[in-house]
Amino acid sequence: MVFFQDFVDKLQVAKKKLFPNTWGCVGEMSLVHFRNIIISQWVLLSITLILSIVYAAIIVSFGEFGIVDLFILYPAVVAVFVAVIGMIASGFGTSIYSSADQEGPDMLMKKALFHFCTLVYIFIIFGAIVFTVFYLTVLGADPIAIILLVIFICLFILALVTLIMRTCCIWNKNDLQWIEKSVVEDNTDKGVSA
């Protein structure tokens, strides 16, 4: 039994040396890398929004008396929806990397909102990719729809990498210490009898 406990202790020491416990788990991307990904998402989302507005304007201008087949207009609508949801998620990401106090009590909420919005955003982008592929197979090659598809795929990869690399360590050591401290110092139930 002593041998087993000694072996476990040595494994824990080796784990601490190999993977310092600054964060609750290993593999979280640095703040600079996170910032670069969020900025890249902002650029791609801006391009998506501009392209979708131009695409919608072109389609409507060729319509007969403003009456346009709505199916032709769907990629523009989908792209605007993806851009808006993506901008909300990227806004929460921006608030994380631009926060002056990276260990403040509000970081837990910012991280939770960012991860939730990014998860929703990933599902929406996946749906947009599937719809755009369906649209291209039904109506043929449309250059703007192909460009939007490539942008959607890039956004999907960026969002997925960001979510995986940030969610691995959503509960960092400081957040856990803050939660434990808040629970101990919570006065809401004191003086209330059952």
Image: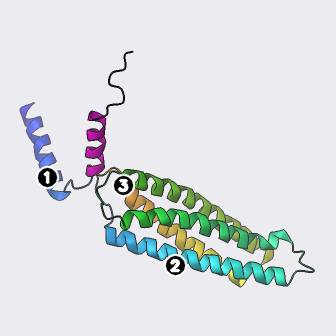
Q: Which residue is mark 2?
A: 43
For the point 70% across and 84% down, the residue is: 143
Q: Secondary structure at mark 2?
A: helix
User: Would you say residue 88 is visible in this rendering?
Assistant: yes
Q: Is residue 107 magenta?
A: no
Q: Is residue 151 left or right of residue 35?
A: right
**164 and 108: which one is in front?**
108
Q: Which residue is mark 1?
A: 14
Q: Is residue 5 left or right of residue 170?
A: left
Quadrant location of the N terminus in the rendered image:
top left
Q: Which residue is mark 3?
A: 107
For the point 11% across and 42% down, the residue is: 9
Residue extent of the magenta highlight: 173-194
Pinpoint residue 91: horizontal percent, then vertical percent. 49, 65
CB under 8 Å between callouts 1 and 3? no
Q: Secondary structure at mark 3?
A: helix
For the point 6% across and 33% down, the residue is: 2
Pinpoint residue 82: horizontal percent, then vertical percent. 62, 66
